[in-house]
Amino acid sequence: MKAFKNVGSAHPTGNCCKSYLQEVLQQAFETGRDLAVSETNLPYKSFPSECGYLLEEILSDRFYPGEFSPLTEEGA
């Protein structure tokens, strides 16, 4: 994951990599949604249709999905 932290930086291929990662993120999310539907037998409408996080958030060193934690506060 750290290899992708500087995606979109001054490197000429940065924007290409960022675009690719956004595409892969969407594909992975859709695959995960399909898996969740098949494993739970819940309808598709039970799950979000799009990832609730931005690529930049996911690639952040401070990213922690889920409930708020004081450990993720700035300066902690």
Image (cartoon, rainbow, N blue to C red):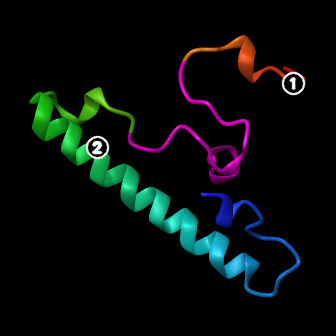
In the displayed structure image, the side of residue 24 where residue 38 appears, left or right: left
Q: Residue furthest bottom?
A: 12
Rendered residue at 66%/14% (across/down)? 69
Rendered residue at 28%/54% (across/down)? 31
User: In the rendered view, would you say 46 is above or below 7?
Assistant: above
The amino acid pointed to by label 1 is Glu
User: In the rendered view, would you say 17 is above or below 46?
Assistant: below
Q: Secondary structure at mark 1?
A: loop
Quarter the C terminus occupies: top right
Q: Secondary structure at mark 2?
A: helix
Dot 1 corresponds to which residue?
74
Rendered residue at 72%/46% (across/down)? 60
Quarter the N terminus occupies: bottom right
Q: Magenta region's main secondary structure?
A: loop
Q: Pointer 1: residues within 10 angstroms few (<14), some, or many (20+)?
A: few
Dot 2 corresponds to which residue?
33
| Front residue of 73 and 25 | 73
Q: Which residues are magenta?
A: 49-66
